[in-house]
Amino acid sequence: MGLLDGLRVLDLTMWRPGPYATQLLAQQGADVIKVEPPGGEPMRAFRSHFDLLNQGKRSVALDLKSAAGRERCLELAAGAEVFVEGFRPGVADRLGVGDDAVRALNPAIVYCSLSGYGADGPLRDVPGHDVNYRAYAAALGPDAPPPTADELPVADMAAATMAAFAITAGALRARATGVGSRLDLAMADVVAHWVATVPEASRPADGTGPVPGYGVYATADGERVTLGVVSEQRLWSTTCRALGLAEHADVPFPERLARVAELDKAVAAAVARLTRDEALERLTAAGAPVAPVLTRAEMLTHPHFRERGVTSPTRTVGDVVRVVPFAQDRGGGSPTRNGTAELDEHRGQGWLSTDWNIE
């Protein structure tokens, strides 16, 4: 069964962060109704992207600028447990679907606002996207290259995951106490919190990693692998021996810190003599912390992620719950709707959380 079976979520978000947050809830069994403007969410123009973020939800098209659309939205909110919106601060209130209006009808609802910089503060009304939030949060180094089109949108995805967590916590409290929540979640805040929890470390001027054997290394065939050696003597020793650097295998951690540039250069040179597959084979067999730098296509077909159900969810039998986006309670139970709804496909339907095959 889904871990959130029966949780009723009204989703007024668009683009990436909000839809990903509510999809995480839907993948755990929540019944998500996606409210779209007339003509549909603009992201529908990028259908392959839209489908990845909106599977398992129902769709209703409502014009919130009209009295009828606003009334229907509030009617759905009255029967929901969660309300998620991603408008600029103040817009939901102007549309008549802000926190005060919704909670007047449903005091126990969890009302989540997801925005770039939050509902208050000096940056409240500043527009932005992922790269801006990371810049303000000190998550882009001074020498960071410009983001590429296919770069992972860290702020968007981090905030979406945090939103799903906060919503679930709020729903848990609401079910226990009848008291709802107003969640103000800013994408910049989440990344700033991440950065604040990591001590600032000085980086050697020559561009090597913080310790020898930790970083990204080029291979002889133009590919790259990563090594994750930190302080562990065992991992350093196995890495050195696998790379033919036995003379460095017994260097203790304090000495490694004092010889970062020298030792990391030796590691890089040893890796550069091998192809990616050769490096992976040797280092993996030795028990070293190695991983290839995969493309998206390679990741999607990798046996590990396929078996785990991360890229193509599967149901298995047992008692273990895998905490990944497609996690399922392996005991079985009610099905979750698959696929992406067409615009306004579910007009006129109310909250029928366990029946996805409604005529």
Image (cartoon, helix red, strand yellow):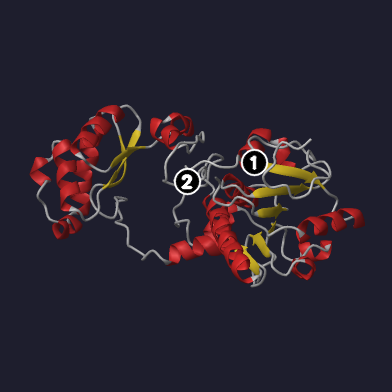
Task: State which quarter of the image contains the N terminus.
Answer: top right
N-term mark: 2 or 1 = 1
Which corner quadrant of the image does residue 100 belong to?
bottom right
The reply to whether dot 2 and dot 1 touch (C-beta < 8 Å) is: no
Classify mark 2: helix, strand or loop: loop
Where's residue 192, x and y in %?
50, 64
Quadrant of the drawing holding the C terminus: top right
Quick one: label 1, few (<14), some, or many (20+) residues within 10 Å?
A: many
Q: Write down the quadrant of residue 301 in the picture.
A: top left
Callout 1, which amino acid? Gly
Rounded to the nearest whole Å, what is the CA distance between mark 2 and mark 1?
A: 16 Å
Q: Note whether 41 is above or below 97 in the view shown.
A: above
Q: Is residue 77 above or below residue 276?
A: below
- Observer-nearest of 328 and 289: 328
Mark 1 residue element = loop
Which residue is identified by label 2? 324
Instruction: Tell me which corner region of the image, top left, top right, bottom left or bottom right, holds residue 150.
Output: top right
Q: Does residue 282 appear left or right of residue 333 in this picture?
A: left
Q: Nearer the viewer, residue 8 or 52?
A: 8
Q: Does residue 137 appear in this view? A: no
Choose between 248 and 330: the one closer to the eye. 330
Residue 225 x/y as whole percent: 32, 37
Residue at image position (87%, 53%) is 69
* Total count of labels: 2
Q: Please tell me the numbered disc located at residue 56.
A: 1
Residue 95 position within the rendered picture, expressed as x and y whole percent measured from the top left: 83, 61
On residue 251, which mark appears? none
Which amino acid, by three-letter code, is at mark 2? Answer: Val
